[in-house]
């Protein structure tokens, strides 16, 4: 469904995932492409199967940012070469006892000059829907490592 109201963004895609049982339950996407057991971070270990919401958010953020980086590089005519984006999502708590998250992105592009990569990463940060969604609410740290 797309929006026809002036000023409202056009919906390009909607993912639907149902979770039963919260952090210790299971998740299944409407398409069936995602089916997994969830685990609470405090209960994680090598013997406990499952993933946690922070890992899922990290995977989505890293994939989205790496794609936005490719778009930024193409627009700016920067040859980034092979890239890898690793997202670290930390579950945090605020002084007043609320839960929050913080995100760190580590972008690697060994075939790209450092200055060019930094420029592409800065542009990607403005293009990535995840970065746009968290801006002003979630601490986001960007690290870019290219060739020197």
Image (cartoon, helix red, strand yellow):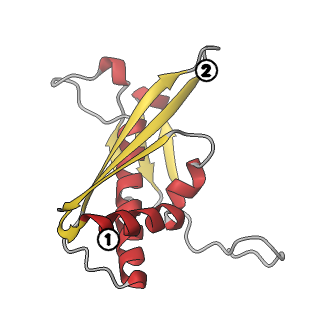
Q: Front-most of 58 and 49?
A: 58
Report which residue position mark 2 lands on.
98
Could one spot residue 16 in this view of the protein?
Answer: no
Q: Quadrant of the C terminus?
A: bottom left
* As drawn, 22 above or below 103: above
Could one spot residue 52 in this view of the protein?
Answer: yes
> Residue 54: x, y in percent?
40, 37
What residue do we see at 51% from left, 46% from top?
18
> Residue 4: x, y in percent?
80, 79
> Residue 117: x, y in percent?
31, 66
Characterize the local packing of mark 1: few (<14), some (14-19) or many (20 or more) Cα atoms within 10 angstroms. Answer: some
What residue do we see at 35% from left, 24% from top?
41
Mark 2 lies on a secondary structure that is loop
Residue sitting at the far right: 6
Residue sitting at the far top: 96
Image check: 69 left or right of 1? Answer: left
What residue do we see at 35% from left, 85% from top?
77
Residue 65 image-quadrant placement: bottom left
- Of badges 1 and 2, the one in the foreground is 1
Image check: 118 left or right of 135? Answer: left
Q: What's the distance in space between the residues labelled 1 and 2, CA to CA?
A: 39 Å
Query: Is the C-beta separation of discs 1 and 2 under 8 Å?
Result: no
Report which residue position mark 1 lands on.
116
Mark 1 lies on a secondary structure that is helix
Q: Quadrant of the N terminus?
A: bottom right
Characterize the local packing of mark 2: few (<14), some (14-19) or many (20 or more) Cα atoms within 10 angstroms. Answer: few
Q: Front-most of 1 and 80?
A: 80
């Amino acid at each position: 469904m797309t929006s026809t109201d002036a000023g409202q963004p056009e919906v390009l895609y909607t993912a639907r995932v149902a979770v039963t049982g919260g952090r210790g339950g299971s998740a299944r996407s409407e398409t069936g492409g995602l089916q997994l057991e969830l685990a609470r971070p405090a209960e994680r270990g090598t013997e406990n199967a499952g993933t946690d919401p922070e890992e899922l958010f990290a995977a989505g953020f890293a994939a989205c940012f790496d794609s936005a980086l490719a778009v930024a590089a193409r627009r700016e005519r920067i040859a980034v070469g092979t890239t890898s984006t690793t997202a670290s999502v930390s579950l945090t708590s605020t002084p007043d006892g609320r839960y929050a998250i913080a995100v760190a992105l580590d972008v690697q592009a060994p075939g790209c000059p450092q200055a060019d990569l930094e420029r592409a990463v800065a542009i990607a940060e403005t293009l990535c829907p995840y970065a746009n969604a968290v801006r002003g609410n979630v601490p986001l740290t960007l690290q870019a490592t290219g060739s020197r």
